[in-house]
Image (spheres, grey):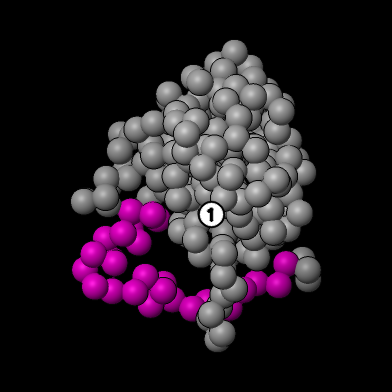
Amino acid sequence: MRIGILGTGVMAAALAEAWTRRGHRVLVGGRSQDKARAIAERLGEAVEAAVPVRVARESDAVVVAVAWEGVDQALALAGADQGSLAGKTVIDCTNAVDYTSGLLKPSTGSAAQRIAERAVGSHVVKALHLYAGTSWLAPAPPGRPERTVAMCGDDETALGVAAGLVRDLGGTPAVTGGLEHARQLEGVAGFVMRLVATGHNPVTAVPAVPAVDRTRD
């Protein structure tokens, strides 16, 4: 699969590297083409730097991996409002969170829903926003539980594409519902940040509950 990544930061670079290890090809582009070229040069021939509109048009699935403040500009450069992402799976891994307070920046709705509005005709899936990108470059520590990736979206095909890409990273996809659940998932990021700021491990703040065996339903 050809994966497009809008963004040139740590998250974008780490995801590009992790997916190329699984045989995918990646197009990466953002507001800085110099940074995009630097990522491509470091990671080799499986990664190509491209202008954002080409990333959108020539990729099978596109990941939005930019700071929240840069989302509108990144989508504009990609031609999202002109339909460049129509029909495509768009994975939103942004965190629209105030890093000091842990509170969500959008007063209503979610970052994912805003992206869905801007990216005309696309199928947005909220996913991959809770783990640092570099965590996917190393196997899970021995004795630690599997890395479950909570995600949500309205299109079943798009959810399937996103789930496959999560599995390729070594994660376990968990669909929590439609895109109306995105604000809930985004709020978890703020919750995690606040716990870390107070010196606590977020893993110990969530009770261990046995998974329900849905195969018996």
Q: Amino acid at mark 1?
A: Ala
Give left or right: position of 32 versus 167: left
Measured along the vertical axis of the image, is residue 3 above or below residue 175? above
Quadrant for residue 2, please give it: top right
Q: Residues within 10 Å of mark 1 (few under 14, many from 20)?
A: some
As for residue 94 lying within the magenta part, the answer is no
Give left or right: position of 20 versus 31: right
Q: Position of residue 10 (x, y in %)?
A: 45, 50
Is there any visible trace of residue 210 in the rendered image?
yes
Q: Position of residue 196 (x, y in %)?
A: 29, 67
Measured along the vertical axis of the image, is residue 22 above or below residue 45? below
Quadrant for residue 81, please give it: top right
Residue at 59%, 73% in the rendered image: 139
Instruction: Check disc 1 and report its element: helix, strand or loop.
Output: helix
As for residue 200 lying within the magenta part, the answer is yes
Q: Position of residue 154 (x, y in %)?
A: 64, 38
Of residues 194 and 178, which is closer to you in this image?
Answer: 194
Q: Position of residue 163 (x, y in %)?
A: 69, 53
Measured along the vertical axis of the image, is residue 3 above or below residue 188? above
Is there any visible trace of residue 154 in the rendered image?
no
Q: List the residue tagged with mark 1.
A: 14
Q: Which residues are magenta?
A: 188-214
Of residues 21 and 135, which is closer to you in this image?
Answer: 21
Q: Quadrant of the C terminus?
A: bottom right
Residue at 73%, 53% in the rendered image: 164
Of residues 108 and 32, which is closer to you in this image?
Answer: 32
Residue at 68%, 24% in the rendered image: 57
Residue at 78%, 71% in the rendered image: 216
Residue with the most extreme top position: 82
Residue with the most extreme front position: 41
Give left or right: position of 77 versus 177: left
Measured along the vertical axis of the image, is residue 84 above or below residue 67? above
